[in-house]
Amino acid sequence: MKKVITKDSQKFLEKYLNNASPTGFELVGQKLWLEYITPFIDSYFTDNYGSVVGVINPEAEYKVVIEAHADEISYFVHYITPEGFIYLRRNGGSDHMIAPSKRVNIHTDKGIVKAVFGWPAIHMRAEKEETPSLKNIFLDCGCSTKDEVLELGIHVGCVITYEDEFMVLNKNRYVGRALDNRMGGFMIAEVARLLKENKVKLPFGLYIVNAVQEEVIKPNVAIVTDVCHCTQSPMVNKIEQGDLHSGKGPVLTVGPAVHNNLLKQIQMVADKNKIPFQRAAASRATGTDTDAFAYSNDGVPSALISLPLRYMHTTVEMCRKEDVENAILLIYESLKSIKNGQDFRYMK
């Protein structure tokens, strides 16, 4: 396989993943992303909620989108007890089961306040133990009263993110929080870099969308990147979740929201360039931004290229480096295969 990820791009990836960009508060991460892709694009624009779009050939009428969503799961401060403990609401699909003993950052107007998820010691728990839930997990920021908490700048609505940072296991496994879906943002940025470095002249306008909202332009074609589940770790039912492997390539989804002819073209590109891929089936919606593109603007031919991920919505989300590189290559080569004005309704 071709080496795609460079030392410089991996440094950007680490910085990008370690930055906190919770849902609804993505600005700092978006600035990092835009700073990285600026040398590879002709122009850019943003929308009112913070989606950032890098554009190559902005004057072209035919528009192709490659897209990833930019947010990170987190919590909101919901209730502060008189004793200074903090109860939470989810912001996105945060997994309450992993919370006890985790360290977190509370984002306030005064800056970051450190806290931990508390939990009763093993010696003190009843024989029939309670499991973590939003009703019983809480934060301790070292305060004894509600007034002390408020003095730190913490109030209802402050955002909370986990402190865990990026690491590499066994040289080829990326681990960290927010791989879902900041890996997608990284991959589309790397596609822009490859196009620039290889001096590829696309015959259409390319819109590289790191999205907070799905519909920021009206494209002719959309290729969406997201994550899916690697189902090879313990306690996963393959009958329910499918048989998908980290290390066997990106995943192409079949389903009503995916345009069959665009999908066939991407599969042919993969075969031609010897890029490994896997298949997954979606019964109705894909659960990704693909759905919004597919059913907007009288229907946009859309496809979904996903990265197999272990331990989704935890602080140790894990993917394989070679899957990331193959996903980048597949998007890159697929773009090169699209013709200006191509109408996917009449593909042979």
Image (tube, helix red, strand yellow):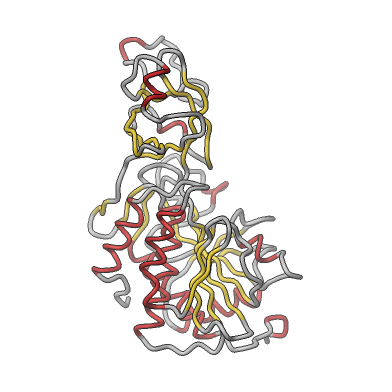
Front-most of residues 93 and 251: 93
Residue sitting at x 42%, y 29%:
154
Quadrant in which the C terminus is drawn: bottom right
Position of residue 115 relative to residue 297, above or below, is above
Q: Position of residue 215 (x, y in %)?
A: 63, 63
Q: Is residue 199 visible?
A: yes
Q: Position of residue 268 (x, y in %)?
A: 53, 81
Position of residue 327 relative to residue 282, above or below, is below
Residue sitting at x 32%, y 76%:
1
Corner quadrant of residue 308: bottom left
Front-most of residues 180 and 89: 89
Residue sitting at x 65%, y 87%:
341
Q: Is residue 305 visible?
A: no
Q: Position of residue 315 (x, y in %)?
A: 37, 42
Residue sitting at x 51%, y 79%:
334
| Lateral position of residue 123 relative to residue 282, left or right | left
Q: Position of residue 95 (x, y in %)?
A: 47, 36
| Lateral position of residue 129 relative to residue 320, left or right | right
Position of residue 23 relative to residue 94, above or below, is below
Position of residue 206 relative to residue 310, above or below, is below
Residue lying furthest right: 298
Q: How many marks?
A: 0
Corner quadrant of residue 249: bottom left
